Each structure stands twice: as structure tokens, then as C-alpha cells.
């Protein structure tokens, strides 16, 4: 941790690799939460 | 004879938030989705933040900078905050895209938004009171920003005592109160249905 963060730069946009990773991770979790079906109640599915 | 204020308050509470609504054992069928889990995940992370924060406050900086257990609890506090923000942002995205202010839920949405802002202030003061070189760097960068907008005289980010008291006493109290009001409003108004769904209870959907 005792070194400067690596930054990506494109024109006006500058972001650290760590921050970009966290944002992409959150977007991935969000997409998975929307897409993956929630497990059904066992008692309900037996009926 | 007019009712006592206690009776008025009790009647108003029972009318708006009866115990069946406050502690439900039944949820609408659309709640069975992973995106509805992130509110309670945020609350769980906040619980861990408060729990580890209380231990840090009792033991003090020497303990959490030098002892193994102290370093562990310090890290637990830090990483619980990271998870708290990740869960809260995903909760915010989920609620934004389903327009969660629908159905007279404006106050629920606004208390959530204010809680988000209060969380940022609490986390910021937390970064300032780590008592390490990181917090020194953050405070000296931030002071220029606050001075440039003219608030540096009463919100002094390099004043450890002020930042510590704001972080451990004032801001958690504010955030705690807003969070409790937010959760009570969720119970009162119910969980927002998806845009294309009719608001039904789980028991009605089973029929």
C-alpha cells in the first residue's frame, strides 16, 4: 500500500485502477442481482 | 376533556404503524428478488460499523495501531464501511431505476438520500481521524477545498479533536436517527413494487 496509485488517463477523465475496479464490481453485482433468480421457498415449491 | 399527548401520540402511532406493519411475517411476492436484499445488507454493514466503532472508541488509538487484535478491529471497521457504501450504492441504483418514490414514498426516498449524504460526511471525518499519514494527507488536501468555499473557520479538517467528536458522537447520531426514520417509513408505506407489478401481499399471491 505504500506506493502511489496507478492512474488511467484519457483526456479530461482520470481514474485510479482501484476506483475503476470497485465501480465495475458494483455494476457487476447490480447486474447479477437483477438477473439471477431468487431461490424459491422449499415449502412453496413442494405445493 | 382533551386527550393527553401520550394518548394522542399512541393513537397516531397505532393508526399509522400498527405492530403488524412494524414486524411483518409476510412480504409481497415481488420482494423475492436479489435486488431487494441490498437494503438489509446495508443495515447489516452499518451494524458492524457501529459495533467495531464502539470497540475502537473504548480502546483508543494506541491499541488499534499497535496490538494485533486492535489492528484487526480497525480493519473490520474500515472494510465494513467499504461494504456499507457498496451495498448502499447498489440499493440506491435499484431504488432509482424502479422509481421508489412512487406510491406516496417521497419521504422514504428523501430520508434515504439524506442518509447517503450523512454517511459521506461520517466516512469523511472517519478518514480524517485515522491518526496516520493517510489522514494527515487527506486533511491537508481537504483544508484548501474547505477554505476556498469559506467554511474552513468553523469546519476545521486539521483539528483532530473537532473531527473526532463529529465522527464518533454527532454524525453517527444524525445518521442513526435518519436510518431509523427511513426504516420506519419503509415499514409504514411498504416495500415499493416493481414498475409493472401490482402491489400485492405474499398471502394474496398464494391464493
Image (cartoon, coloured by chain):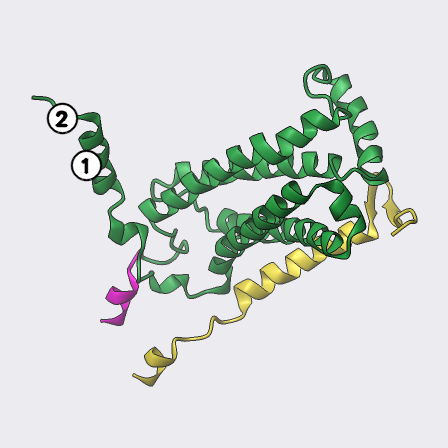
Chain colours: A yellow, B green
Helix, strand or loop under label 2: loop
Q: Name the residue under label 1.
A: B11
* Residue in front for this viewpoint, B165 or B110: B165
Q: In this view, does B187 lie above or below A30?
A: above
The label number, if any, that marks residue B3 in the structure image: 2
Residue depicted at 54% across the width and 50% down the height: B47
The residue under the point 74% across, 22% down is: B146
- Compared with residue B189, is residue B37 higher up or lower down, i.e. above or below? below
**What whole-number distance in Å separates the C-alpha atoms at marks 2 and 1?**
10 Å
The residue furthest bottom is A46
Q: In this view, does B54 lie to the left or right of B2?
A: right
Task: Name the image quarter holding the C terminus of chain A.
Answer: bottom left
**Looking at the picture, how far across and down is residue B199, in whole percent?**
31, 55
* Percent of width and height locating residue B186: 38, 47
For the residues labelled 2 and 1, say whether their Cβ atoms are less than 8 Å apart: yes
Q: Going by the image, does B27 lie left or right of B151?
A: left
How packed mark 2 is, by other alpha carbons closer than 10 Å (few <14, some 14-19, many 20 or more), is few
Q: Position of residue B5 (x, y in %)?
A: 21, 26
Q: Position of residue B168 (x, y in %)?
A: 61, 35
Q: Give me the residue at 62% from left, 61% from top.
A: A29
Subunit ID for the residue under disc 1:
B
Q: At x 46% / y 65%, what residue is drawn?
A: B33
Mark 1 nearby-residue class (10 Å; few <14, some 14–19, many ≥20): few
Residue B174 vertical position relative to residue A18 in the rendered view, above or below = above
Comparing B139 with B62, the one in front is B62
Q: Quadrant of residue A42?
A: bottom left
* Magenta stretch in the rendered image: B199-207
- Of A13 and B134, which appears nearest the observer? B134
Amino acid at each position: 500500500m505504500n506506493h502511489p496509485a496507478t492512474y488511467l488517463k484519457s483526456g479530461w477523465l482520470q481514474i485510479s485502477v482501484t476506483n475503476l475496479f470497485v465501480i465495475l464490481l458494483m455494476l457487476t453485482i447490480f447486474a447479477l442481482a437483477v438477473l439471477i433468480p431468487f431461490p424459491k421457498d422449499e415449502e412453496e415449491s413442494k405445493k | 376533556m382533551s386527550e393527553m399527548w401520550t394518548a394522542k401520540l399512541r393513537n397516531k402511532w397505532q393508526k399509522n404503524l400498527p405492530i403488524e406493519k412494524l414486524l411483518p411475517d409476510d412480504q409481497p411476492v415481488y420482494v423475492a428478488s436479489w435486488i431487494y436484499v441490498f437494503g438489509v445488507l446495508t443495515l447489516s454493514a452499518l451494524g458492524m460499523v457501529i459495533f467495531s466503532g464502539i470497540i475502537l472508541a473504548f480502546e483508543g488509538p494506541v491499541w488499534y495501531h499497535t496490538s494485533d487484535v486492535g489492528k484487526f478491529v480497525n480493519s473490520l471497521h474500515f472494510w465494513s464501511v467499504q461494504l456499507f457504501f457498496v451495498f448502499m450504492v447498489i440499493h440506491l441504483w435499484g431504488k432509482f431505476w424502479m422509481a421508489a418514490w412512487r406510491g406516496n414514498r417521497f419521504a422514504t426516498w428523501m430520508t434515504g438520500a439524506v442518509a447517503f449524504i450523512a454517511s459521506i460526511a461520517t466516512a469523511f471525518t472517519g478518514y480524517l481521524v485515522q491518526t496516520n499519514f493517510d489522514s494527515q494527507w487527506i486533511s491537508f488536501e481537504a483544508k484548501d477545498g474547505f477554505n476556498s468555499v469559506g467554511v474552513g473557520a468553523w469546519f476545521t479538517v486539521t483539528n483532530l479533536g473537532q473531527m473526532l467528536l463529529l465522527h464518533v458522537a454527532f454524525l453517527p447520531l444524525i445518521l442513526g436517527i435518519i436510518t431509523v426514520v427511513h426504516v420506519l417509513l419503509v415499514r409504514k408505506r411498504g416495500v415499493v413494487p416493481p414498475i409493472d407489478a401490482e402491489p400485492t401481499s405474499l398471502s394474496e399471491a398464494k391464493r
